[in-house]
Amino acid sequence: MSNPTQIEQLIERVERLLVRYEELQRTNALLAEQVETLSSERDSLKSRLSAARGRVDALLERLSETAGTDSNKGGA
């Protein structure tokens, strides 16, 4: 019985498909984990960027106020 029957060939193919399916499930789980990690990192960076922008805006506001008072002193 050297030639595999159609049933045996079908069984082998189904087994290979099952192995591939399990590999894809593991890969998908790892990718989902990476997406979650990167999304969290992105959110953290966006928050830090927003805070930094707020600090820069506050500094610019102080500089413009200082420049305004300095020009008033020199003009009087």
Image (tube, rainbow, N blue to C red):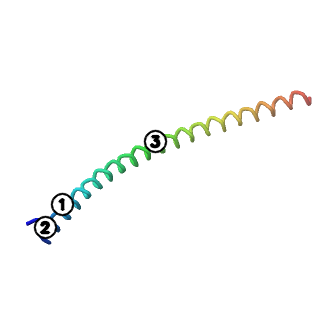
C-alpha separation, residue under disc 3 versus residue under disc 2: 53 Å
Mark 2–mark 1 CB contact (< 8 Å): no
- Amino acid on which disc 1 is placed: Glu
Residue at point 66%, 35% (across, down): 58
- Residue 34, position as x, y percentages in the image: 39, 46
Farthest residue toward the bottom?
6
- The residue that disc 2 covers is 4
Looking at the picture, tell me which residue is in the foreground, 24 or 51.
Answer: 24
| Percent coordinates x, y for residue 56 in the rendering | 65, 36
Lateral position of residue 57 relative to residue 27, left or right? right
Q: Taking 29 as reference, is 15 left or right? A: left
The quarter in which the C terminus is drawn is top right
The three-letter code of the residue at mark 2 reads Pro
Check disc 1 and report the residue beneath it. Answer: 15
48 vs 13, left or right, is: right
* Amino acid on which the number 3 mark rests in the picture: Glu
In three-dimensional space, the C-alpha distance between marks 3 and 1, rounded to whole angstroms, equals 39 Å
Q: Residue furthest left?
A: 1
* Mark 3 or mark 2, whichever is nearer to me: 2
Residue at 25% in and 58% down: 21
Disc 2 is placed on an element classified as: loop
Q: Which of marks 2 and 1 is nearer the N terminus?
A: 2
Q: Classify mark 1: residues with Cα within 10 Å, few (<14), some (14-19) or many (20+).
A: few
**Residue at point 76%, 35% (across, down):** 64
Q: Where is residue 71 in the image (x, y as percent from the top left)?
A: 86, 31
* CA neighbours of label 3 inside 10 A, class few (<14), some (14 to 19), many (20+): few
Q: Is mark 3 on a helix, strand or loop?
A: helix
Q: Name the residue under label 3.
A: 41
Q: Along the line of sight, which residue is nearer the eye, 67 or 51? A: 51
Q: Quadrant of the N terminus?
A: bottom left
